[in-house]
Image (cartoon, rainbow, N blue to C red):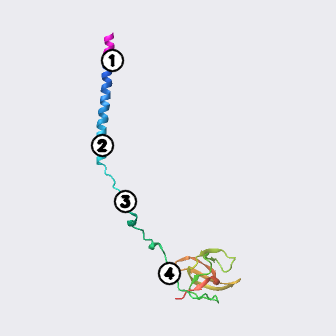
Amino acid sequence: MKKRRVDILIIAGTLVVCIVGVIYLLLLFTGLGYKEASAMTPQARITIIPAANVPTIDTNFLIVSPTPTPISSETNSGQFTIESYVQITGTGGNGLRLRASPGTEADVNFIAAELEVLKVIGGPVQMGDYIWWQLIAPYDEGRQGWAASDFLSVIEQ
């Protein structure tokens, strides 16, 4: 019985040594494969550029210079001609409400921006404290309405 126990221990020891050997071989071959793969991986090269040589971005193209629209002095009489062009002025940058009909009580169709150019298609109509002119945007016929002449300047052509 003692001999059988010794045989089992020898077999168990041999199995442990074999298993450890197989694991070692697996790790050895896996490690070699990893080393080969890492040797073939391209490596990044970093070039440090001194601050004096760093190119700067030219931002001059970002500066927009508005093209002035030739306008005459504001009309004191508030009289314009049909088919002439007028520019919105004197709103302090808030824009001018163009209304569905003459008068400050009429619904607002849209707000024309300061310096926007519009075409006169109707008027004049005296309503309240203002003389009203019907205007239309030359680029969009859907943008039309009535505006008070106090905020319009004639554009000379």
Magenta stretch, residue numbers:
1-9
- The residue at which mark 3 appears reads as 48
Q: Is residue 2 magenta?
A: yes
Label 3 to label 2: alpha-carbon separation:
29 Å
- The residue at which mark 4 appears reads as 67
Near mark 2 (Cα within 10 A), the count class, few <14, some 14-19 or many ≥20, is few
Q: Which amino acid does label 1 sit on?
A: Leu
Q: Nearer the viewer, residue 60 or 133?
A: 60
Label 3 to label 4: alpha-carbon separation:
44 Å
- The residue at which mark 2 appears reads as 35
Label 4 to label 1: alpha-carbon separation:
100 Å
Q: Nearer the viewer, mark 3 or mark 2?
A: 3
Q: Is mark 4 on a helix, strand or loop?
A: loop
Q: Is mark 2 on a helix, strand or loop?
A: helix
Instruction: Pick whichever of labels 4 and 2 is earlier in the sequence.
Output: 2
In the image, residue 57 sits, relative to residue 119, either above or below, namely above
